[in-house]
Image (spheres, rainbow, N blue to C red):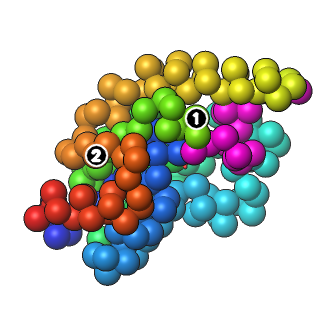
Amino acid sequence: MEPDQHLILTGFMGSGKSSVGRELAALLQRPFIDLDEYIEQQVGLSIAELFSQKGEPAFRRLEQQYLEKIMTTSSVPLVLATGGGTIISKKNRDLLHHHGYIVFLNACEKTIMQRTLASRARPLLLAEGSENIGQRQFRRQKIKDLLDERRPFYECCQLSISTDNLSVHQIAARIIQQLR
Ligand code: S3P
């Protein structure tokens, strides 16, 4: 990674991008931005509210707009945690590759299931109106389908780290070790 490049974290929901990003930023003494939190602050709505009130296409437009703003206006190199779907758009991918060094936090389906189980904040993983048993099955299938679809985009990165069974600190330490 070049010293002036942003360090970008990508990976599926629940892969640890936000918590690892915070830890990395502290260790590297860089500012940290979580793209979802940034959007929430700018718009004044949570991601779940944005999806339910304005729909996913509106969320994707905001995601692109704010990603572009962050990538092109930050005067210092950042650690940036993207959302799990940020890298799917070609324009976002070009921005990320142009301005940053991209690290993919890889996690298997079982780990993602466990890490996202308690979350109501991820609209793509919620089956509206179904019972608990239906929720679980819906979530498992959705994770599988989205992972199949997205894996090629995640894998187009400079560094890939397997995060299963590792703590936030261990993952951050591995990334730093690989950067040296
Ligand atoms: C999304 C992932 C979420 C958030 C939104 C859409 C996705 O971020 O951006 O719910 O498409 O995978 P996290 O990966 O931080 O959960």
Could you tell me residue 154's position as x and y percent? Answer: 35, 35
Q: Which residue is mark 1?
A: 113
Q: Quadrant of residue 75?
A: bottom left
Pointer 2 local density, CA inside 10 Å: few below 14, some 14–19, many at least 20: some
Taking depth in this image into account, of 121 and 5 the one nearest to the observer is: 121
Outermost residue toward the bottom in this view: 29
Outermost residue toward the front in this view: 165
Could you tell me residue 81's position as x and y percent? Answer: 44, 57
Please provide the residue range marked out in magenta. 115-129
Q: Quadrant of residue 93?
A: top left
Q: Is residue 152 left or right of residue 57?
A: left
Outermost residue toward the left in this view: 180
Indicate the amino acid at tag 1.
Answer: Met
Q: Is residue 4 left or right of residue 118?
A: left
Could you tell me residue 108's position as x and y percent? Answer: 43, 32
Marks 1 & 2, CB-CB < 8 Å contact: no
> Which callout, 1 or 2, points to the residue nearer the camera?
1
Q: Which residue is mark 2?
A: 161
Queried whether the magenta region covers residue 14, the answer comes back as no
Does residue 9 sit above or below 32 in this rendering? above
Taking depth in this image into account, of 150 and 176 the one nearest to the observer is: 176
Q: Residue at x 35, y 31 (%)?
A: 153
Majority secondary structure of the magenta segment?
Answer: loop
Could you tell me residue 41's position as x and y percent? Answer: 66, 66
Some atom of ligand 1 lies within 8 Å of the CB belonging to the residue at label 2: no
Describe the element under mark 2 as helix, strand or loop.
strand
Q: Earlier in the sequence, mark 1 or mark 2?
A: 1
Describe the element under mark 1 as helix, strand or loop.
helix
Does residue 25 sit above or below 162 in this rendering? below
